[in-house]
Image (cartoon, rainbow, N blue to C red):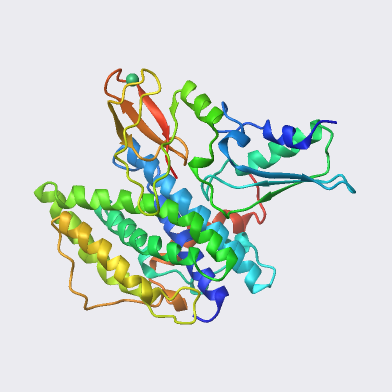
Amino acid sequence: MNDPRTAAASVVDPEIRVITIDELGILRAVEKDPASGRVTVTITPTYTGCPAMDVIRADIRRALAVAGHPDAEVRTVYSPPWSTDWISDSGRAKLAAAGIAPPAPVPAAGVVPLTLAVRCPHCGSPETEQVSRFGSTACKALWRCRSCSEPFDHLKAL
Amino acid sequence: MNGPFDFTLALGDDALIAAQRLAEWTTRAPEMEEDIALANIALDQLGAARLLLSYAGELEGAGRDEDALAYLRDDRQFRNVLLVELPNGDFAVTMAKLFFLAAYQLPLYTALAGCRDERLAAIGAKARKESAYHLDHGALWVKRLGDGTEESHRRMQAAVDQIWPYTHELFAADPAAPVDPATLRSAFDETVDAVLAEATLTRPESRWAPAGGRTGVHTEHLAYLLAEMQVLHRAHPGAKW
Ligand SMILES: [Zn+2]
């Protein structure tokens, strides 16, 4: 039987498969009741409408069952709200390696400024432009590099 | 409105109906990026609607979940404002609706984040971050069209004129609610005035103020919207993909 925390943390995000839910910062807690053996996992969504949540819940239960914890419950909490600041350094490095520009630090309260320089994950150039603030998934925006002309995804600061 | 149930239901209905209208643009938006943007905003609204309606069902305590509230009520039982049920019109009308709704929802969710009800506070804290993006997107198009060509200016002004009267209903006073909508008016006005000025558009005079949505008296458009939204669930209760 393996550690339930390690098992839950190994689940990858179904929409960004290079990064685990732990690195993404949506895995909030893993607790095991010593008496009953029941594991309770707490997660939080990136966006309220994130359609990947059902898959993530199922993947967590499957990973725990494989690790020897068939009795598992996955709870979803909304407070405190997820922030891109919760993405770990290793997560950011993996995003960049997969061609997804990681988010900048979240500015203080108020409207998110959209003029921050985003570096091209392909060639490193800061000469980039936003094509659309809404991308292939709720958490991404579509950008384009003016130096190498490649389009790329950018995880929006939230 | 009366208690927290009515308040939560009303906000949930606003988000749900707004989501359904925005989703009508999917595969029909003027460009690919806009298609994706509107679908994303619809998804955010749907996410907020699910949280609010689920909580409303718990507050009611009659065993109704989010699906029962979304799919098994008739138009007279919906509590959304008229603004969100109005047809999409041309792209300018859709942007006017999106912009006015976001300029209201952002201060609303921000105030909700600080209210005493823990569940509503959590929903507000989550949804306000998304609303900031919606407001930014709507404002961008209002400016781009308003300060664009002669034709785009004409159509954006016509859209603002058409939708403006429906904004008053958003701020109907409800002192007993967790957040009194009347207190959001100044933040809304400030945002709207700044954006319209930059867009070289004129804010219409406030004469006519249609209302009734919060008490279930809707335009004829809502019943058609609900018929399409509810048909699958009513034909196949509990159907799953
Ligand atoms: Zn590049």
Would you place residue B39 above or below residue A4 in this image? below
Q: Position of residue B195 (x, y in %)?
A: 22, 57
| Nearer-the-camera pick, B118 or B83 | B118
Residue A123 in the image, given as x and y percentages of width and height: 36, 17
Quadrant assignment, res A134: top left
> In this view of the protein, which residue sits in the foreground, A134 or B165?
A134
Q: Is residue A102 visible in this depiction of the protein?
A: yes
Whether residue B88 can be seen here? no
Res. B156 image quadrant: bottom left
Q: Quadrant of ligand 1?
A: top left
The residue drawn where x is 55% and y is 65% is B120
Q: How many marks overall?
A: 0
Q: Would residue A53 be found to the left or right of residue B191 on screen?
A: right
Q: As rendered, which of B227 and B100 lies closer to the eye?
A: B100
Q: Residue at x 39, y 19 (%)?
A: A122
Residue in view at x 25 percent, y 62 percent: B192
For residue A88, side relative to residue A37 (left or right)? left
Figure check: A24 above or below A35:
above
Instruction: Estimate the x, y position of residue B111 in percent, counting from the top left.
Output: 44, 66
Image coords of residue A138 (percent x, y): 47, 41
Q: Residue furthest right?
A: A35
Q: As displayed, is residue B4 above or below residue A31?
A: below
Screen quadrant of the C terminus of chain B: top right
Which residue, as the protein is rendered here, is positioned at the far left? Answer: B150
Asked which quadrant contains residue A153, the reply is: top left
Q: In the rendered view, would you say A113 is above or below A101?
A: below
